Amino acid sequence: MISAADTGHRPALFIPTAPRYGCPMTSVSELYAARVADGSLSPDPVQQAVLPELERIGTALSAPVKRGLFRRAPEPIPGLYLWGGVGRGKSMLMDLFVDSLDESLSRRVHFHAFMQEIHAAMHAARKAGARDAMEPVATEVISGLRLLALDEMQITDITDAMIVGRLFEKLFDAGVVVVTTSNRAPEDLYKNGLNRQLFLPFIDLIKSRMVVHELTSPTDYRQNRLQGTQVYFTPISPDTRAEIAAVWRDLAGGAAAPLTLNVNKREVTLPAFRNGIARASFYDLCGTALGPADYLAIAEAVRVLVLEDIPRLSRQNFNEAKRFVTLIDALYEARVRLIASAAAQPEMLYVEGEGTFEFERTASRLREMQDRDWGR
């Protein structure tokens, strides 16, 4: 994959925007109410309890910034760390909030994609001779930006753990407001990670500069959307491809982009990703030399995986079959929802060759993962 550093272009994160100021076009509460009125949302008191926090930030951001030689620095606006279980509506609320703002001064991006851009920019800064690559990168991130909305924050990589603390400190010092969603409470970020004691000051920084709000809704809306929906399509045909594409459109709900994960100094790319939902083919994930660490990283990064075109497996594609077994194990243990298209039913995918006995467990797991209540 060619990075921004290789092409000489800056990552998309740093595309400059013309500043515009003014009040939010429509408040997030009004947008939420409109969605309820048109039937696309069901009113949820737990979600509605978050709206005042988002309104607080939107109102503060809409206030004009005083200019002049003797102006006082504005009081920092506390951000929001919104966490809770999968499918509770965190990403939806963030999207509504960003839609309510002047888009020229805010950016909404998935956390993994954001960190990918930061790594690419730091690599470019080092090649350009920067002694401290973070300085020019942070300067460009901050330029023209007042709100950074990061979806699905999770820290699994030691490099990310070391970078994110310094970057957030610079963002806060520059007055950039951060709103983020996560499936974990701040104190559980990078839990049991290597040299985690070096990461603890970042957790303290989050708690001091952001309001931490747990979304405790008992309803898993993402799971509800899959209730009664077919999740395993066979055989592979134009009809089943069309059906799985329709499921993807319904779940992803918008334009997707590739997601690249850094695993042990290597890159693992999911071709399409949006709001915790990924889409890839069998050969994307099992036809290349990926291993257990790669599949664990994928299982950590996604909540739903749409995996297409699983072929019949045999001694002719034994390496791909072994990788597929490892992938399913990782998804199963992490309770990732799997939507798949395959050449045959699970029990008939691997019927001859070395490893057929071991594959019986994989077939059983594929069956279990089709259950309507499967998922975390």
Image (spheres, rainbow, N blue to C red):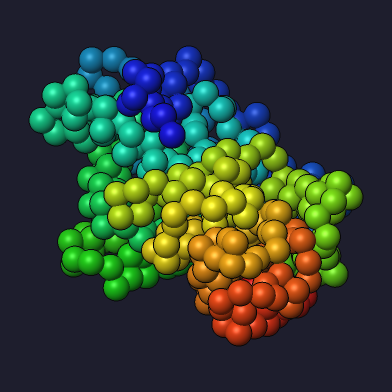
Outermost residue to the left: 131
Q: Quadrant of residue 27?
A: top right
**Relative to 14, residue 339 above or below:** below
| Quadrant in which the N terminus appears | top left
Near-viewer residue (107 or 316): 316
Residue 162 % position (x, y): 23, 52
**Residue 88 as seen in the image, left or right of residue 213:** right
How far across and how far down the image is residue 64, in percent? Answer: 45, 24
Picture quadrant where residue 11 is located: top left
Residue 270 in sight: yes
The answer to whether residue 46 is visible is no
- Image side of residue 250 versus residue 163, left or right: right
Q: Give the image quarter of residue 194.
A: bottom left
Tell me what residue is drawn at x 63 percent, y 36 percent.
Answer: 99
Name the residue rendered at 63%, 58% in the picture: 305
Q: Nearer the viewer, residue 38 or 364?
A: 364
Quarter of the figure that contains the C terminus: bottom right
Number of numbered discs visible in the structure rendering: 0
Q: Position of residue 91 (x, y in %)?
A: 60, 52
For image coordinates 23% across by 15% down, the residue present is 69
Left or right of 203, for residue 286: right
Residue depicted at x 63% and y 40%: 256
- Is residue 109 left or right of 293 when viewed as pictured? right
